[in-house]
Image: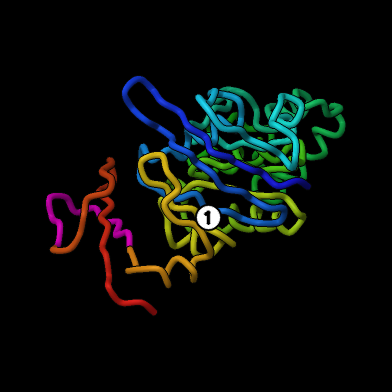
Amino acid sequence: MDALHIDRLSKRFGDVQALKDMSFSVHPGEIYGFVGSNGAGKSTTMRIALGVLEADSGEVRLGNTLMNDSLRRRIGYMPEERGLYAKEKIADQLKFLGQLHGMTAAAAQNNANHLLERLGLADRAEDKLETLSLGNQQRVQLAASLIHTPDLLILDEPFSGLDPVAVNVMSDMLVDRANAGVPVVFSSHQLDLVQRLCDRVGIVTKGQMKAEGTVDELRSRGPIVYDIHTPARNWYPAGTRLVEEHDRGVVLEFNSPEQD
């Protein structure tokens, strides 16, 4: 397996500087957490790595080789906007996606069966995607990113909206791939998961990498920052800052001067 290298990426959309000299690396067998508020540049970075967007400057490498279409076929990608076919059978979709990656029908079917078993969905293989809960649909989306046994995993908010059981299932799958030597990078707002799963973390603000290191290293550099998820609205205790507002409530940020 080769490391992913993001090297001095910059990207502008009109007057908005989405990325500015973004740089980091994800090594084989490492789980890397990509953390930042909405609009910080996480998804833009991932889309440039995948060739969906073109950077204004900078480069993406896998090992020592500039990213190209051939290398991108080795990537497993889980987008934030889930994109499978609602009215198609789950197993058929996974088999089809495997064949798009160059697998034989038999190999794709075998991988699909294995992944659905691991994800607790073997008994739903012949069901249409739309009949599954949103959490189970997300498990299928993970299976789609793994169907071709990729050499690099890039996951955009993979844990968003999952119940605790589904979070544990997905976490186990990511750890399993990292233990097999695959570099894994995922973005998330859920700092408890980032702390639990990630070997290293990159904190992104306004398109720039502001801090990077292990969780312990980042804690030692300054105040601890907590995210508070609450359904309460228009109630912001002293010392907090509104980070995000969505249908289920708000996310507040709280700075603590204490370090432990």
Drawn side of residue 170 relative to residue 217, left or right: right
**Lateral position of residue 193 relative to residue 17, left or right:** right
**Rendering quarter of residue 221:** bottom left
Number of numbered discs on residues: 1
Q: What residue range appears in magenta?
A: 226-237
Q: Is residue 10 above or below residue 180?
A: above
- Secondary structure type for disc 1: helix
- In percent of width and height, residue 217 lies at 49, 69
Q: Quadrant of residue 98?
A: top right
Residue, disc 1: 167
- Please say if 215 is above or below 6: below
Q: Position of residue 59 (x, y in %)?
A: 61, 33
- Left or right, residue 149 beside residue 187: right
Q: Quadrant of residue 87?
A: top right
Identify the residue at image location x=27%, y=73%: 257
Q: Position of residue 199 (x, y in %)?
A: 59, 62
Please rate how many residues cluster around mark 1, counting C-alpha atoms within 10 Å: few if below 14, some from 14 to 19, many from 20. some
Above or below residue 144? Residue 1 is: below
Check the image and name the residue furthest to the top: 14
Query: Residue 115 or 229: which is nearer the viewer?
Result: 229
What is the x, y in percent for residue 112? 75, 38
Q: Residue at point 37% right, 46% down?
A: 205
**Residue at x 45% of width, y 28% of height:** 11
Inspect the magenta stretch and tell me whether residue 141 lies in it.
Answer: no
Residue type beneath disc 1:
Val
Q: Residue at x 66, y 53 (%)?
A: 173
